[in-house]
Image (cartoon, rainbow, N blue to C red):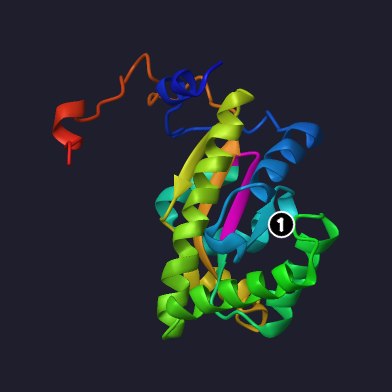
Amino acid sequence: MDFLELMTKRYTCKHYDASKKISDSDFNKIKECLRLTPSAVNLQGWQFYVAHTDEQKKKMRDSISDFNQGRFDECSHAIFICANKRVTEDFYQKVLAKEKSDKRILKEELLQAQYASRKGFTELNSETEKDLIAWCGKQCYIALATAMYAAESMGIDTTAVEGFDAKKVDAILDLDKKDLTCQVVLFLGYRSDKDSNVITNRPKSRLDLEDIFVEI
């Protein structure tokens, strides 16, 4: 299936079949796609918290807005996508060390140039903590799209969720001590037969090309 076909077929799932669970092998593919998601200056200023067991979902349920709790209960997995709100020197060095071990950058002078460039560009976007969260949050939405279409390519349905209480997520997961804050949540699973949002019932609607594209 080419990407345009994925775009055409995917929709936002409103009701999941709670009896159907994503296999470990399929979910591991989604995790690997998330790991490979591009980010500005390869900072990778994110972490992904996964809830799929009954215990894990019970722990997080109160952070989900009441109008989303039903589909949270029904879905197979939920990913809480979290952005860095501080970048420490240890974090810069961790990313740099991984680039070196992956043989992305071999020469020491190039490693140092990469470090200076990454740190400099990050600091341009982090005059305040709020600025850095906004910048890393943009990268989190790239990861969100990656996971949504990776899932679609495997016949797995998704719902991107902003109806949640970020402060509650941060508190439950103790994210402040980890220099993180939750930006968005993704539910994943398999649609229920009662899901009325399927494409056959509710066709996609988007503005026409001429409404959104302008030749410069």
Give the percent coordinates (x, y) of residue 93: 74, 76
Name the main secondary structure of what is drawn in magenta.
strand
Q: Position of residue 103 (x, y in %)?
A: 81, 55
Reply yes or no: does residue 75 show up in magenta: yes
Q: What residue appears at the point 52 percent right and 18 percent down from the top-left corner?
A: 2
Quadrant placement of the C terminus: top left
Q: Residue at x 62, y 76 (%)?
A: 175
Between 108 and 12, the one lying in front of the other is 108
Looking at the image, can residue 110 be seen?
yes
Binning the other alpha carbons within 10 Å of mark 1 as few (below 14), some (14 to 19) or many (20 upward) gives few
Q: Could you tell me residue 9's position as x and y percent?
A: 45, 20
Q: Nearer the viewer, residue 35 or 18?
A: 35
- Left/right placement of residue 5 relative to residue 19 reads left
Mark 1 lies on residue: 56
Asked if residue 115 lies in the magenta stretch, the reply is no
Asked whether the viewer can see residue 180, the reply is no
Residue at the (80%, 61%) spot, across then down: 106
Label 1 sits on a secondary structure element that is: helix
The outermost residue toward the right is 101
Q: Is residue 47 above or below residue 174?
A: above
Left or right: where does residue 212 sit relative to residue 180?
left
Q: Which residues are magenta?
A: 74-81
Residue shown at 65% from the left, 58% from the top: 48
Res 99 → quadrant: bottom right
Q: Is residue 124 above or below residue 144?
A: below
